[in-house]
Image (cartoon, rainbow, N blue to C red):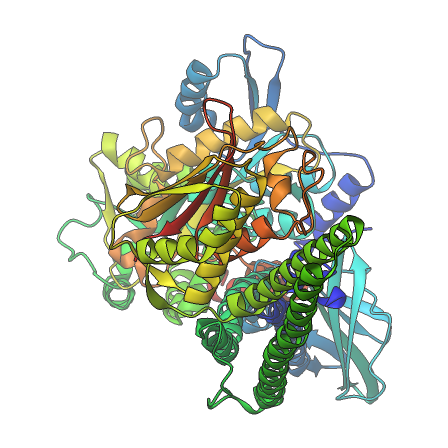
Amino acid sequence: MCVTHFTRSLAAVICLATTGAQALEIEDQKLYPGTGTTTIKVASTADLDVFEPFILQFQREQPAVGIDYYVASSTDLHAAIQGGEVFDVAISSAMDLQFQLANDGAAQPYASPVTDALPAWARWRDQVFAFTAEPAVAVISRERFAGLPRPKTRQELIALLRQNPDVFEASIGTYDVRQSGLGYLFATQEARNSDTFWRLSELMGRQRAALYCCSAQMIDDVGSGRLALAYNVLGSYAAERIARDDRLEVLELEDYATVMLRTALIPATATEIEGAALFLDRLLEEGMRDTPETWVLPPLGAADEPEARAYGPIRLGPALLVYLDRLNREAFLRAWSDALVQ
Amino acid sequence: MSDAARGPFWWRSIGQRLTVLLAVIAAVLAILSWWMVTSFAREAAERTQDNVLVASATTIAEALRSEQGTILLELPYSAFAMLNAIGEDRVFYRVAAGGETITGYDDLIPPTLPERPGDVAVRTISYRGDQVRVVSVQRTVLAGQQPVPVLVSVGQTRTGVEAIGTGLSRTAAVLSVAFFLLAVGLGAFAAISSLRPLNAFAQAVTRRGPSDLRPLRRKVPDELSPLLIALNRLMERLGQSIRRSEEFIAEAAHRVRTPLATVRAQAELALHTVEKENEKKMLRRVIRAVDESSRSASQLLDHATVSFRAEALARDDVDLAELVVKVAEGLSPTADMKDINFRLDAKSPAPVRGDLILLESALRNVLDNSIKYSPGETEVSITLAQDDPSQWRLTVRDHGRGFSAVSLPALTGRFTRGANVEKIVGSGLGLTIAEDVLIAHGGSLELTTPEDGVGACVSLILPAA
């Protein structure tokens, strides 16, 4: 039986998965062997180069535990876990899909002093645990923005886009929410928070905005000057790129920020529970530090930044199911397409 | 009495009995109140969850609309956001039009359906390995020309409800224990304060002097007044009985002694008139027997006097030295008959507090004994000394046959006589009387054999005044 409500194509994938033909499209994979017999299988949406320092640090502390790291898209990962594929830890940036896994009983509870130390908003039922708080940001190209004022709010951004159609014509990038789970999450949450989202979307549609699957490509194109503005980019990726590319700049929008929580869970199918628990504890400890040592991902404390605090991080709760609902998704995508794909 | 003595230790005291019973009642009430609070809390939490679920399902049902014959639904964000209110619970939903799932979890089939649109069906079912509370509401939507009944079901696990129930139950348990302890403390206090009049009453009775048989005049609680009345009646009867005994003893002494004196006088007279030796011998025997009878009678009376006077002991100032001299003088005719000499070593004053008649009787019996058991032409020495400032020791030492091997304490038993008393008439009451008197005065009687092994040594020990 097929119980997930996503795009039709996705639903088909999940139906296939639940009937046994598991289809995990692996983007990347690397085995970090340990000295012991335990090897945990980690399924993650985070790229290897982002996560590798953490894995190496973890293995310095727990040399016995081997780690088999798989990178997949959030929808594929969700489908695989839902379909019963064996993983010991699932890490995803799509908190709505992670929540749905736990809600549908595909995650198992785990409690330790470390999970107890998490703030209440960063865990759900001792099954889903957040370890980063990552805001969506707008990234601009310094070159293309030369001589233009830096808008402080989305209202000002809308005004700027209206006044300078020549600068922004076909030069705005944003997520294709039909493809990207994360983009969909950012868009739905923003639409819920503020009606400026639709006005902005409409404007971007009129200026023939380019649609992307992933943050990294958007940032690349802003860097090269093909885009003047990338809207709703994952802040963590942007910060990392800006550190080595001075053609980029983060637009400080002070009215609000949509903050996503990167979450981890232990799937119900997990076999190496002890190893998974060690890995999860270490992951959460890293997330609770003020400045994580081993990765560029922002810590949970980032949810306390002033602009993020206005709405708080996206809540882990049943409300996340709303936009996963098939009818809602169809309705939202229809409205979004009407606005953006003109 | 046996009723009160049976049972566990706490049953023997009214105070403890009350405390324990009150504690048991408090425990029962505490458990009852804990149970009630717990079940109310659980019920309240369950109702809250039901209400939230109904609100959620209704919100979803309200969002149903139809467009060109198709039923459309945009799940309201609030319908799910509100489900977070109870706790972190798993959420399931299903919207079905005419049995066909529009959206949601296909297999969430509520066991009961609302009968009419507007009705709400609430049930707990087992779903996906958890107990799930499912609320269903029905709304009819006009799809084109066709009215279609749409069933909206929203289900939620009960972890939050249970957590609220458990938390409140724990709080209630702590409060119940606190109330129980408080009730036990107050119960003990109540038991003690309600028994206080009884204790005060008992103390008032105990504090009374031994001869004080006046009726008690006290304010007592209603429950104690029958006891007070009964006690006063008892004391009155006891007083009467004691007075009767006194009269009887005086009467008996008089009635027994007077005829015996007459018999003795007649026998003396007859002794002088008869000539024959064997008749004289017979009469002397009669006289001796009368003497012994008279002596026994006075000892019996002495003993009876001691028994009843000791109960109500007088507290006169008595000079022991003076008393010894007086008693020794009174006995000197008898002593002289056997050529027994009293050697007195007593310096006046030797003050003690006590009943003069009883002390005299005790002393007389001891001295009488020593004369009786001493052979003729011996000496009985009487020494009065002070062992320490708190007590006097009057030692009477004779040179008689002494105490035989029978254990000395047995000799002071009533009608008990030594094993070596053959040919000497006696009642066995002398030392008993002496000891009773001394004990009544807070003293004691000591029987010892002197260091040279000859005769007996009797010590009368009395507290000094």
The residue sitting at the left extreme is A147
Q: Residue at 39% of width from left, 63% of height from top?
A: B354
Q: Quadrant of residue B55?
A: bottom right
Q: Is residue B162 visible?
A: no
Name the one closer to the observer, A189 or B194.
Answer: B194
Residue B270 against residue B334 in the figure, above or below: below
Asked whether B348 or A39 is in front, the reply is: B348
B95 shown above or below B290 = below
Q: Is residue B291 left or right of residue B124?
A: left
Could you tell whether B195 is left or right of B60 in the image? left
Residue B32's image quarter?
bottom right
Spot occupied by residue A284 in the image (x, y as percentages of width and height): 44, 36
Give percent across and percent down for residue A195. Answer: 40, 72
Q: Is residue A42 visible?
A: yes
Residue at 13%, 53% (x, y): give it: A147
Question: Which residue shows up at 65% across the image and 83% down it?
Answer: B62
